[in-house]
């Protein structure tokens, strides 16, 4: 039982990682007042760029740079449409998702000609698992050994980075001048403008951070979790991250917990396939898969708590005419 | 800034055409970047979509789905609502059609099944739009997020239902049994051939005519009824609508019911018209493509028909193009679609403000 739990928690960490990175990305963007439906597209774009870069240059780190570059570029298109041209945030996000879904397949066909995939990555082209010091020695110690050696040790660097980003985000958002301004821009951009700070510049910077984090999430998918890019490999993770962001009420620590919950549900769904539960019978996998979305809808409907987003979210900022 | 001084053709024709040209230009650059000739590609695309009868039939068949989802998006848009859940509503609408066909095809004739299937598609699609609408109108949850969530819920629900309940016994493929022929919508080429008119074999079926009727219905509903006026008021200025005594919650809910029902009709075309069984993922992104169609078509039924035919031609021509030039995938059409959404949706102000300014200045001078 305990071992099963450790195995499931281990799976939870792996599945949650891209969700955490993407949800934190969304947090920076939405806290600054920019709705980001385009998380999905940025993850997919980065996954492709990272896998392509890693395949060509044989280095996961170079791949990661390409992934981040692709993702930040997409974030800048979003910014250009939403901030500079005061376009609809949701339309812009849908546009980015659609363009990326088509472009990744088109380009990978052209470059690699493998039916929309990239070549399988191995060795240095992937982020490999890190074993903690003494992990092997502690393997047999009861409880602690299982937690330290099997659960905490043995993930790749991006997993640890994702978890580390949570306190970092908390510090940036709540303890720095930039974070204060970022939150203010999302709540009351007029006040920020009156104080002589550029609303657009803050929002662009928030989107750059958003792009970097989505870039990490995408690179994790194609160069760490899997060994290469597959068509549509983000498979709704961006939308699930968005759900986690709302479920965590736009705050870093609750967002982390929401991501872990959704990741855990995924691990449970895999585990429960074909398992009979006494008294209930077989629980359909789909029923568990769908829980994150159902829970988010229930939360939004105010049945379990209340999700109130940043006040100025989705509204373009227009300086008053002189 | 007075809108009245800008000639009507600028907003109706010039700006949309400029946006689509820009989208084509960028797509041309993508094709150039992968080392092919964009002019040659465009030639194959146009010939594949419009050069011969069968191609035209396929183009109109794709356009049928896009008219339904385009109308669905635009009805919600008119009320200021962004229905991003067309995909899920179409999926569940198809379930309604499939259930009617599966339960009645052994006992009932076509003229009983067809109207019931229309009702089934509308009711199931509308029901899937109702819950997000209710939550938006009565409990203040944001419709964009809930409709996205409902797309995923619909997808899981359909997998569960088809794999566990509706799958044909003893077969591995996740789809239902094929309906009896009396539950098939007749193909238009079959209807035309007794008249001596040959329009080429294609999946184009009666659902296309129904799509055109829906356009007329939406046009009448939005511009020629009291409810349509209320909807447009809500979309233009919700505060004014409330002050005018319009029950905004009720209008919101009805707008989403109609929107969901229209999206559900995709099931008629796909399930009853072409596939003749209930299968997974038949919606294939039409719900999202409807957003591009509605934006291109300026939320007007005539514009939507034109935009749907344009996108239908891209789908059909894109398939043909991929056949002629194997290095180009059909996904290039998805890129064009995304660019259209970007330029005519998200970046609409980029040209509009300048062009309008130009005409206003000229009118003043």
Image: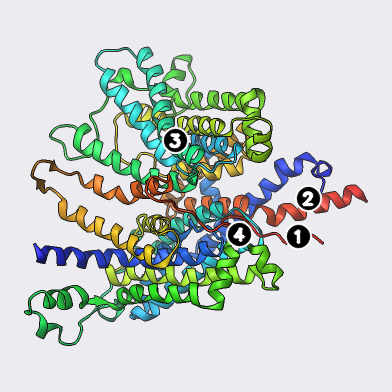
Crowd band around label 4 with a 10 angstrom C-alpha radius: few (<14), some (14–19), many (20+): many
Q: Is residue A196 above or below residue A77?
A: below
Rounded to the nearest whole Å, what is the CA distance between mark 2 and mark 1? 20 Å
Question: According to the image, label 3 marks what residue?
Answer: B129
On the rendered structure, is A14 left or right of B59?
left
Looking at the image, which residue sits at the far bottom?
A: A133
Which secondary structure, mark 3?
Answer: helix
Marks 4 and 1 on same chain: yes
Rounded to the nearest whole Å, what is the CA distance between mark 4 and mark 1? 18 Å
Q: Is residue A180 above or below residue A262?
A: below
Marks 4 and 3 on same chain: no
Question: According to the image, label 4 marks what residue?
Answer: A82
Label 3: chain letter: B
Label 4: chain letter: A
Rounded to the nearest whole Å, what is the CA distance between mark 4 and mark 3? 27 Å
Q: In the image, residue B67 lies at what x, y percent?
A: 52, 34
Crowd band around label 1 with a 10 angstrom C-alpha radius: few (<14), some (14–19), many (20+): few
Question: According to the image, label 1 marks what residue?
Answer: A320
Crowd band around label 2 with a 10 angstrom C-alpha radius: few (<14), some (14–19), many (20+): many
Q: In the image, residue B303 lies at what x, y percent?
A: 62, 36
């Amino acid at each position: 039982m305990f071992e099963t739990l450790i195995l499931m928690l281990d799976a939870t960490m792996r599945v949650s990682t891209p969700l955490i990175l993407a949800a934190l990305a969304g947090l920076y963007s939405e806290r600054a007042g920019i709705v980001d439906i385009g998380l999905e597209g940025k993850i997919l774009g980065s996954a492709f760029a990272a896998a392509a870069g890693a395949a060509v240059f044989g280095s996961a780190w170079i791949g990661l740079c390409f992934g981040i570059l692709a993702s930040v570029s997409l974030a800048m298109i979003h910014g250009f449409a939403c901030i500079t041209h005061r376009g609809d945030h949701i339309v812009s996000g849908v546009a980015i998702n659609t363009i990326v879904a088509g472009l990744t397949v088109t380009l990978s066909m052209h470059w690699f000609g493998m039916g929309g995939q990239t070549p399988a990555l191995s060795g240095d082209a992937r982020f490999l698992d890190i074993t903690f010091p003494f992990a092997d020695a502690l393997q047999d110690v009861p409880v602690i050994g299982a937690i330290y050696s099997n659960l905490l040790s043995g993930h790749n660097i991006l997993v640890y980075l994702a978890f580390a980003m949570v306190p970092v985000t908390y510090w940036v958002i709540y303890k720095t001048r930039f974070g204060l301004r970022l939150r203010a821009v999302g709540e009351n951009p007029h006040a920020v403008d009156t104080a002589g700070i550029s609303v657009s510049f803050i929002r662009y910077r928030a989107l750059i951070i958003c792009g970097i984090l989505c870039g990490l999430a995408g690179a994790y998918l194609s160069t760490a979790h899997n060994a290469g890019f597959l068509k549509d490999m983000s498979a709704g993770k961006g939308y699930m991250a968005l759900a986690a962001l709302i479920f965590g009420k736009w705050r870093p620590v609750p967002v982390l917990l929401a991501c872990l919950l959704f990741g855990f549900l995924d691990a449970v769904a895999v585990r429960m396939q074909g398992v009979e539960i006494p008294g209930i019978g077989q629980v359909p996998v789909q029923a568990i898969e769908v829980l994150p979305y159902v829970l988010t809808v229930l939360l939004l409907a105010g049945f379990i708590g209340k999700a109130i987003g940043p006040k100025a979210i989705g509204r373009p900022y227009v300086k008053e005419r002189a | 800034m007075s809108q009245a001084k800008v000639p009507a053709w600028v907003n109706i024709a010039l700006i949309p055409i400029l946006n689509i040209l820009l989208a084509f230009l960028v797509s041309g650059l993508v094709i150039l970047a992968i080392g092919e000739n964009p002019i040659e590609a465009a030639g194959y695309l146009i010939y594949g979509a419009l050069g011969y009868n069968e191609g035209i039939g396929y183009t109109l068949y794709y356009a049928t789905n896009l008219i339904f989802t385009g109308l669905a998006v635009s009805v919600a848009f008119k009320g200021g609502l962004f229905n991003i859940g067309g995909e899920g509503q179409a999926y569940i609408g198809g379930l309604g059609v499939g259930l009617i066909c599966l339960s009645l095809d052994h006992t009932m004739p076509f003229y009983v099944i067809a109207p019931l299937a229309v009702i089934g598609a509308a009711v199931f699609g509308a029901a899937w739009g109702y819950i997000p609408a209710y939550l938006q109108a009565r409990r203040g949850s944001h419709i964009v997020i809930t409709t996205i969530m409902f797309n995923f819920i619909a997808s899981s629900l359909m997998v569960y239902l088809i794999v566990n309940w509706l799958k044909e016994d003893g077969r591995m493929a996740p789809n239902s049994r094929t309906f009896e022929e009396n539950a098939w919508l007749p193909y238009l080429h079959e209807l035309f051939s007794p008249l001596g008119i040959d329009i080429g074999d294609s999946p184009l079926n009666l659902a296309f005519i129904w799509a055109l009727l829906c356009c007329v219905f939406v046009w009448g509903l939005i511009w020629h009824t009291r409810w349509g006026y209320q909807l447009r008021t809500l979309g233009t200025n919700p505060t004014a609508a409330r002050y005018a005594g319009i029950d905004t919650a009720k209008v919101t809910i009805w707008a989403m019911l109609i929107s969901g029902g229209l999206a559900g009709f995709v099931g008629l075309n796909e399930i009853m018209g072409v596939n003749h069984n209930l299968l997974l993922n038949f919606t294939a992104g039409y719900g999202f493509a409807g957003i591009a169609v509605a934006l291109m078509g300026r939320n007007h039924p005539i514009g939507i028909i034109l935009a749907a035919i344009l996108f239908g031609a891209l789908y059909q021509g894109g398939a043909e193009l991929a056949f002629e030039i194997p290095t180009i995938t059909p996904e290039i059409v998805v890129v064009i679609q995304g660019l259209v959404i970007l330029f005519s949706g998200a970046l609409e102000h980029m040209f509009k403000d300048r062009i309008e300014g130009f005409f206003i200045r000229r009118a003043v001078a």
